[in-house]
Amino acid sequence: MLKGAAMGIAETIPGVSGGTLAFITGIYERLINSIKSFHPSLFSVFKKDGIAGVWKKIDGNFLLFLVAGMGAGLVIGTKVFSKLLESFPLHLWAFFFGLIIASAYMVGKEIKKWNALRVITILIFSGIAYAVTISSPTSGSTDLWLVFISGAIAVSALMLPGLSGSFILLLMGMYSIILPTFKELLENPNGDNIKIILVFIAGCATGMLTFVHLLSWTYKNYREQTLAALTGFLIGSLNKLWPWQEVLSTRVNSHGETVPSFTQSISPASFGSLSENIHYGTEPHTIACISLMIGGIALVLILDRLSAKNPE
C-alpha cells in the first residue's frame, strides 16, 4: 500500500513518473505481469478454478493493496503535495532529481552485457524524453473523446519509468482540466465532473491493458534493450526535474491563478540573477537543493540495499 501511495503521489506531480517509483520500490516487473494477466484467457481460468483461480492469476492481493495505496496517494498528492510544490518548488524538485539520478543508475546496472547497440538505445531514448520535456503545452478540452485519449496516453507513460503521465497531460493541455476536476469531485461531486473522471478512467484502463502487453513482450524477449530504453527515458527526464527553472510563459488555471506553463533549465547562478520568476522565485537555495539531491540518491540506494537483504 505504501508503494502504491508513492506511485499515486508521483502521478499528481508533472515530471515525476509512477513507473519510476514502481522501479525504485522493486515492484515494476510484478506490476507489469499482474496487469498483463487481464486477458480473455481468464474466462477459461474461471471455468476451471472459479473466482479463487482468477484472483491468483491476476495476483489479486498485490493489486488490491497497490491500487488502494494509489488511490490514497492520489488524494494525498492532490491535497498535500500540490501545496508543498507551491511553497517549496526548488526543494521538492531537487529531491526528485536525486531520486531519478539514482533510479537511472539502478535500472542501468540491471543491464548485464553492454554493447554499442545498448549505448545507442540509451542515447536515442534519452533524446526522446528530453524532447518531451522541452515541448510546449497545448490547449486542452473537456470533450469526452479527448478526455478518453488523454487517459490512454497518460497511463501508457505511467508504465514507463522516466515519463510522467501528469506531464504528458500537461503537454496535451489536459492537466489543468483533469486535476481540478478530480479536486472538485472530492469536494463537491456533480454530474459533469463524475462523467469526465469516469471517461478518463476508462481511457486509462484501455491504454493500460493495451500498452502493458507490448511492454511485457519487449521486456520478456528483449530485456537488455528494454532496460537500456528505460534508462534513457530516466536520463532524458532529468531536464524536467532540474530545480532551477526560468519561467518563459504562464497560463491561468481553473481557479484564476497565474501559474507557469513553460520553463527552461538554467544554472543556480543565472537563477539567482533573475529579476523576477513567478512560482519559483529568484533565491536559488543552492546548498539546501544539493543536500536534498544527495538525500534522494541516498534514499534509493538504501531502499535497494534493504530489498537486496530482504527480497520479500
Image: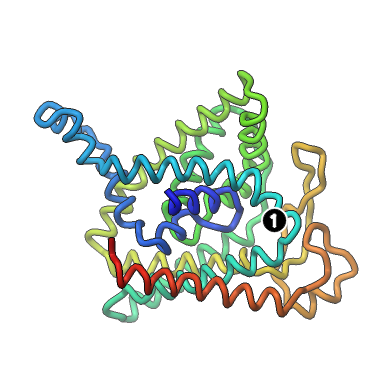
Task: From the viewer's perspective, tell me whether residue 209 is left or right of residue 15.
Answer: left
Q: Tell me the quarter of the image containing the C terminus.
A: bottom left
The residue depicted at 57 percent of the width and 63 percent of the height is 131
Residue at 40% x, 36% y: name it: 206
User: In the current view of this chain or complex, which residue is farthest to the left?
Assistant: 48
Name the residue furthest top.
191
Q: Is residue 258 above or below residue 236?
A: above
Q: Quadrant of residue 196?
A: top right
Q: Position of residue 123 (x, y in %)?
A: 46, 73
Q: Secondary structure at mark 1?
A: helix
Label 1 CA crowd tier, 10 Å (few <14, some 14–19, many 20+): some
Q: Is residue 280 above or below residue 150?
A: below
Q: Which residue is mark 1?
A: 85
- Res. 92 image quadrant: bottom right
Horizontal and vertical percent for residue 124?
Answer: 45, 69
**Left or right: 61, with 85 as reference point:** left
Whether residue 41 is visible: no
x and y percentages locating residue 136 in the rendered image: 67, 54
Establish if 1 lies above or below 114. above
The three-letter amino acid code for the residue at tag 1 is Leu
Question: Of residues 229 and 289, which is closer to you in this image?
Answer: 289
In this picture, residue 291 sits left or right of residue 198: right
Taking the spot 58% from the left edge, 41% from the top edge, the residue there is 75
Q: Residue at x 64, y 51 (%)?
A: 81
Above/below status of 10 relative to 306: above
